[in-house]
Image (spheres, helix red, strand yellow):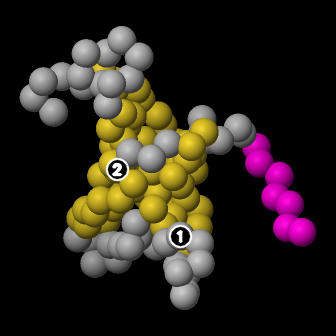
Amino acid sequence: MDIQKRGAMRFPLDVPVVFWWTDTNGVRQQAEGRSYDVSEMGVFVCASLCPPAGAQVGLKISIPDAFDAPHGLRMEVEGHVKRVEHVRSGEGRDGFSILSDRVILRENDVSN
């Protein structure tokens, strides 16, 4: 049995995520995925295109109908990629985890 200790409680959250990073050629890359879980320390993003381990990454997570916010909430996260998972034969999930350096929670406005 593989037991991993976690430094923070993780919460399942399956919502759209937009993320970006700068590749080794200095070109800004952007892709989309879905969040798998979040904590105050980081996020796991399910995506077929992933930034490399160690890359600085920014992401926006849309949380519709959150609490009493009329247009939902948006979580903005900056951090670096801790690990990338690519699975074979349909077992598990493709994606990456980031360790958060900065997290901001904002109310969405109508223009977003």
Q: Amino acid at mark 1?
A: Arg
Residue 3 within the magenta-colored segment of the rendering = yes
Q: Secondary structure at mark 2?
A: strand
Outermost residue on the front side: it is 90
Q: Disc 1 marks which residue?
A: 93
**Residue 104 place in picture, x, y as percent:** 41, 29
Residue, x 45% and y 62% (percent of image)?
46
Residue type at mark 2 is Val
Q: Position of residue 109 (x, y in %)?
A: 18, 22
What residue do we see at 49% from left, 72% from top? 94
Where is residue 66 shown, x and y percent of the image?
Answer: 38, 23
Label 1 environment density (alpha carbons within 10 Å; few <14, some 14–19, many ≥20): some
Separation (CA) of disc 1 from disc 2: 16 Å
Q: Does label 1 or label 2 sit earlier along the sequence?
A: 2
Is 33 left, or right, of 7 in this rendering? left
Mark 1 or 2, closer to the camera: 1
Identified at 86% across, 60% down, the residue is 3
In reply to whether residue 21 is colored magenta, the answer given is no
For the stretch drawn in magenta, the main secondary structure is loop
Label 2 Cα neighbours within 10 Å, binned few <14 / some 14-19 / many ≥20:
many
Image quarter of residue 105: top left
Task: Tell me which corner region of the image, top left, top right, bottom left or bottom right, holds residue 20.
Answer: bottom left
